[in-house]
Image (spheres, rainbow, N blue to C red):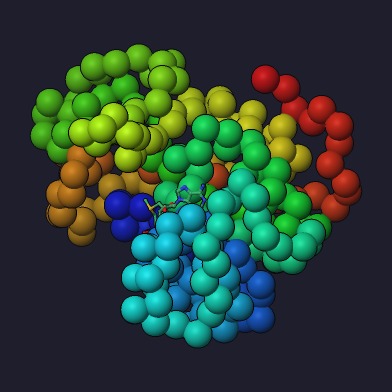
């Protein structure tokens, strides 16, 4: 599942035709409880589920699956160059790091030439709206251009949750500067069958403004060019 709209990979085929997933080495970053890796394994792929949170991986372990779980930072992938055919992420890692380019450079490094990265994040336009499912979530309340991160702190002032905003243009430049090629940007529409409300996600908002952005990128054959892309 790529996001709260309910678009799943069976329908989207963003990683390629399901029959071609068989035998593919796939890295899932920010895997959480590894739902995507579990589905990939069921298709005959060889997933590796990576998350920085040991706790999340404990959930993955509890739910089960016969694929490796790796506790590591997506910005420092503990794999050799060109180890994977595909890298995927549903809302994992990238919204939570201050330097997404470091993650994308690492992804490019571990992808084989011609390999593909597909990742979903909250659609950047949502940053400007309150995270409310009702009509109050439809009026702009802050600047789309304000990159100040959203931070929640505990009673000692320790940051316990941080989300970083990138505009759509920032994301495109992040991808290009990492030596990856953007081949598609999917903005799933809210489907009629999905009547659920969850946090700021609702049919009301989903029918009017996009909620998820899915970036489909490919790694070309050559080595990374010095100074690829620009700010
Ligand atoms: C919103 S959850 C998404 C989990 C899962 N992909 C899903 O679809 O349910 C985000 C995940 O990214 C992980 N994460 C955050 N920063 C990370 C980093 N730097 N490296 C690896 N994982 C990270 C979190 O621990 C969390 O499990």
- Position of residue 57 in the picture relative to residue 111 (left or right): left
Of residue 206 and residue 136, the one placed in the foreground of this image is 136
Residue appearing at x 44%, y 31% in the figure:
164
Residue appearing at x 52%, y 62% in the figure:
71
Residue appearing at x 29%, y 29% in the figure:
157
Location of residue 12 with respect to 225 vertically, above or below: below
Q: Quadrant of the C terminus?
A: top right
Of residue 87 and residue 11, the one placed in the foreground of this image is 87
Q: Position of residue 169 (x, y in %)?
A: 56, 25
Location of residue 45 with respect to 8 vertically, above or below: below
- Position of residue 26 in the picture relative to residue 160 (left or right): right
- Position of residue 58 in the picture relative to residue 103 (left or right): left
Location of residue 147 with respect to 46 vertically, above or below: above
Q: In which quarter of the view is residue 21 placed?
A: bottom right
> How many callouts does the rendering have?
0
Q: Position of residue 84 (x, y in %)?
A: 70, 65
| Residue extending furthest toward the front | 156
Q: Quadrant of the N terminus?
A: bottom left
Q: Position of residue 79 (x, y in %)?
A: 71, 62
Q: Is residue 207 visible?
A: no
Location of residue 40 with respect to 53 vertically, above or below: below
Q: Position of residue 64 (x, y in %)?
A: 39, 82
Of residue 149 and residue 213, the one placed in the foreground of this image is 149
Residue appearing at x 42%, y 67% in the figure:
57
- Position of residue 15 in the picture relative to residue 159 (left or right): right
């Amino acid at each position: 599942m790529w996001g709260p709209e309910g678009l799943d990979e069976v329908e989207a085929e963003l990683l390629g035709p399901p029959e071609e997933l068989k035998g593919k080495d796939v890295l899932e970053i920010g895997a959480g409880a590894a739902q995507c890796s579990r589905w990939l394994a069921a298709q005959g792929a060889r997933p590796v589920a990576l998350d920085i949170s040991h706790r999340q991986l404990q959930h993955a372990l509890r739910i089960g699956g016969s694929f490796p779980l790796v506790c590591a930072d997506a910005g420092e992938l503990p794999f050799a160059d060109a180890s994977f055919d595909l890298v995927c992420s549903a809302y994992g890692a990238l919204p939570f790091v201050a330097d997404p380019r470091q993650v994308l450079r690492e992804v490019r490094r571990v992808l084989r030439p011609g390999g593909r990265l597909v990742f979903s994040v909250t659609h950047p336009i949502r940053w400007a709206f309150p995270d409310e499912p009702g009509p109050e979530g439809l009026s702009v309340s802050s600047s789309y251009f304000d990159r100040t991160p959203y931070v929640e702190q505990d009673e000692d002032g320790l940051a316990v949750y941080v989300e970083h905003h990138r505009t759509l243009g920032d994301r495109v430049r992040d991808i290009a500067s990492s030596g990856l090629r953007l081949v598609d940007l999917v903005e799933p529409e809210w489907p009629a069958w999905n009547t659920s409300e969850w946090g700021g996600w609702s049919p009301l908002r989903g029918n009017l403004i996009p909620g998820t952005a899915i970036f489909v990128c490919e790694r070309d054959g050559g080595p990374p060019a010095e100074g690829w892309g620009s700010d």
